[in-house]
Every structure is written in C-alpha cells, then in structure tokens.
Image (cartoon, rainbow, N blue to C red):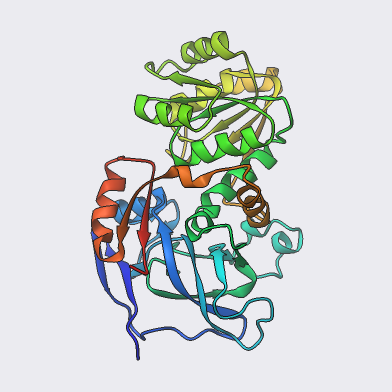
Amino acid sequence: MSTNIGVILKDVLDMKIEELPGGVPQPEPDQVCLSMGPVGICGSDVHYWQTGRIGDFIVKAPMVLGHESAGTVCAIGGDVKHLQVGDRVAVEPGYPCYTCSACLGGRYNLCPDMKFCATPPYDGSLCQYYCHKAAFCFKLPDHVSLDEGALLEPLSVAVHACQRGKLSFGQKVLVCGAGPIGLVNMMVAKAGGASVTITDISESRLAKAKEMGADAIFHVTSRDSRETAEEIVNMSGYSDLTIECTGVESSIGTGLWATKPGGSYVQVGYGKAEVNFPIVAVGIREIDIYGIFRYANCYPKALALVASGAVNVKSLITHRFPLKDALKAFELTKAGTGVKVIIDCDN
C-alpha cells in the first residue's frame, strides 16, 4: 500500500509531518480520491496550531490541517458521473447534511452537521492523497491553474461577503484590513464595479493592496475609531458598503462610523467573542449589519471570476514550500510575513 504523508496537528503547538494511517484512502461511492497539489495556509490553521480551538471548535484528537486546496482526481467512486481520473479540481472544503432546513433553504453553510476540512473533528487536505465528496469538487478549465483553484476558497468568502452586503455598481466600498481576506474582498468589490478604499496598520500590506488595484489606501495609526473614521471620510467620503476583515474592536468601530446613513456593513473578521461598538449610531443611521460564515453556492461564481480574468488571485501568493518543509511554511505565516503561503503536496 502506498504511503500518504500529511501535516497533523497532534496537540496545541505540536504539529508533525508524518505518514497517515491507512495509506492512500479509497473513495466512497459519492467521492473522488485526489492527488493533492497546492494547499494554502489559512489563519484558522495557524490559530488551531497555536491555541487548539476557534470558538466552540476544539481540537480533541490529532487532525490533518489545511482546507484551501486543489488536486487531480486519481480514483472515483462508483456513483460519480461528472468527473474522471485526471481531472484537475478545486475542493470546496465543507459538505452538509442536505436535509436540514438550512440546506433545503440554500444556506448550507449554516448546516449544523457540516463536515468541514480541518475543523475539529474532521481532517483537512494538507496531505498527498485525500478523498472528498465529488459534488463539492469543481473541475478547472484548462487555462486555470491548480494554484488558482486552491485560492477559490478565500475568494469564495469574499464573494459571499459582497453578496451579503448587496454590492452594486458604482458604490464606494471600505475594506478594513489588507490581509489575504481583505485583499480578496477588495478584488471582488473592484470586479463588481466599486471603488475601494482599504485600511491597515501595516504599510507593507497597504503597498501590496495598492499594487493589486486599491483606489485608495489608509494607514491606521490611532486606536480612536471615530477619529480614524473621520480621517477616512475626509479622504474618500462615506462608504456605501463596509467590509470589516480584522475582527479588531477599534477597526469595527471605524468601519461603522465610516459607513453612510442607510449603508451596509459586513463583519467578516473574527477577533474577541464580544466587543463594544456604537450601537446608537448604528440604529439612528439605519446601518444594516450582516454577519457571514464561510459561504454557500459561491465556488462556481469564484471560479467564473478567475476564469474570466476579472480577478487575479495568483497575485496573492508570496511564498511556497514543498510538503517536507510545511513547518517552515507555518512559522512564516505565523510571523505575518508575506500574504499567502502555499504548500505543494505533490513536491
């Protein structure tokens, strides 16, 4: 039996690169087995490594990390009709129960029985071979690379956020935070015809945002959210739509103060479980606040944005490592160096 090497989180701060039990997995009737290619490191992977939990999701047993992934079909289950061996696919990392009210209503991201890669207790895809539901594997056109396929995952978060905020042509959009998720939200908003101002405390990240097409950048130097908002408004005007991608309390306040009366605000970033924010200002200005959790029915739209050339996700990639150097890749990501770090499972 061939070996299957993966990156396993054994416990808090204890991550190993080792052979997974059982060798190469065999697909169930509705699954495909993938020879994995690129897998991006997400902030959630680092968070599980460093703390062992995100909210109520707690690592209680060894878990393979990784959920931003693409690969090549190497075996198919008997019920799979739309894919064949050799197809290159992007992996939407979660699959729901299909029967609950959330699933039947089209919002399967809210399914209470969602099985999502690298969310306890389910293994992720940062390994050489991985089986996944075929219905959540999306065949890539010949001109779309596996790297782009892997980055459909964070791009889908941005598609969902912009849809929740009812993005429309000609709007002014404020994106708070120029990390990977802030940058993909900026790109989707730009593709949707908006002008985008993006903020961050890091001048290097703002420089990257400008390089990638931001209409305006704002370097945050104050923790006074209202003062910061006033400076942003003086520079770019009030936003029709604000997309907050940091989860930092002061940034949340800034985003709300900078949103126009009657505007929309989407909370993408997660930080502290509870924060203070200007609720009276939200109420008397009738700002619509939307939460988002992952995405639903967004992968085909994300793929269309990439395939058409409307969005260039490859520009996010700043570092890449072979699977044997995955621990170095995680250390680099933890340090905040670069934007998106890729691990090549086939190298």
Question: In screen coordinates, is 319 left or right of 80?
Answer: left
Report the residue at 70% width, 59% height from top: 102
Residue closer to the observer: 280 or 322: 322
Report the residue at 38% width, 16% height from top: 222
Based on the displayed image, in which of its 4 quarters is residue 40 positioned?
bottom left
Residue 156 % position (x, y): 59, 50
Question: In screen coordinates, is 193 left or right of 120?
Answer: right
Based on the displayed image, in which of its 4 quarters is residue 35 positioned?
bottom left
Q: Quick one: which residue is furthest to the front in this view?
A: 143
Report the residue at 53% width, 40% height from top: 184
Q: Quick one: which residue is furthest to the top in this view?
A: 234
Residue closer to the observer: 296 or 280: 296
Question: In screen coordinates, is 280 left or right of 58?
Answer: right
Task: Indicate the quadrant containing the N terminus: top left, top right, bottom left or bottom right.
Answer: bottom left
Task: Indicate the quadrant containing the C terminus: top left, top right, bottom left or bottom right.
Answer: bottom left
As drawn, 180 above or below 24? above
